[in-house]
Amino acid sequence: MSPPPEGATADSTGPPDRQTLRLLERQLTTDPLVATTQFDPNTYEPRLLTATLDTERYPDTVTDARIDIRWFTTGDFSIHYVETRGDNTHWECRWDRHPNTHNTRLHFHEPPTGTEVSNLDLASLHPLDVYSTVFKAIEQRIKSLW
């Protein structure tokens, strides 16, 4: 891994990696599970990429599902998956790579609340490989709901 970019410290995620966010957005637009994508605050200066998932793939109890992606120039990231049910409760989990005091740099916030955390081991940290891992898990989650 390359050294942290200028202005980033060893305990910092650094600035957003706009190139990687745009790469992931292009991948999301080709995924049949994804209904829409949106950058925040905008496409010119993205810090957050949100993908709204197609709820037609879910049972009626799930009224909304989305992925929030943050990717940083240090290679750190956060991919947060959230399902909302009709009673406004949430089922969520998160794949993270960032400096922290609770676990290893690479870790997973376990469903259903995302509060329990376990260490994570991924074969590759390439953004498209991480994307593939996350979407395989989401597809398994959808199957389990049926």
Image: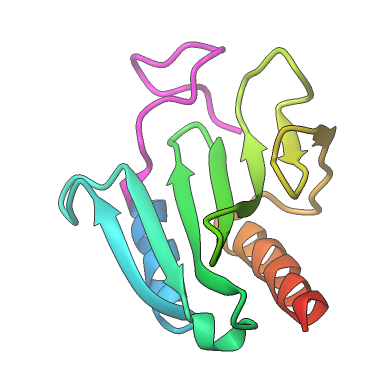
Q: At which x and y percent is residue 117?
A: 79, 32
* Residue 43 location, quadrant: bottom left
Q: What span is in magenta?
A: 1-18
Dominant secondary structure of the magenta stretch? loop
Q: Which residue is drawn at 73% across and 53% down?
A: 124
Q: Residue 131's image quarter?
A: bottom right
Residue 16 sits inside the magenta stretch: yes
The residue drawn where x is 46% and y is 43% is: 71
Going by the image, does 139 lie left or right of 35? right
Please identify the quadrant where the N terminus is shown.
top right
Position of residue 69 relative to residue 38, above or below, is above
Q: Does the magenta stretch include residue 58?
A: no
- Horizontally, residue 82 falls left or right of residue 46, namely right
In the picture, the quarter occupied by the C terminus is: bottom right
Residue 133 percent coordinates (x, y): 71, 63
Q: Quadrant of residue 49?
A: bottom left
Q: Can residue 55 be seen in this view?
A: yes
Nearer to us in this view, 61 or 67: 61
* Residue toward you, 125 or 36: 36
Q: Which residue shows up at 56% across the image and 60% down it?
A: 87
Residue at the (82%, 76%) spot, across then down: 144
In the image, is residue 60 above or below residue 26? below
Total numbered labels: 0
Q: On the picture, is 70 further left or further right than 45?
A: right
Residue furthest front as drawn: 87
Residue 33 visible to an observer of this rendering: no
Q: Where is residue 98 in the image (x, y as percent from the top left)?
A: 60, 28
| Image coordinates for residue 61, horizontal then vertical, percent | 62, 75
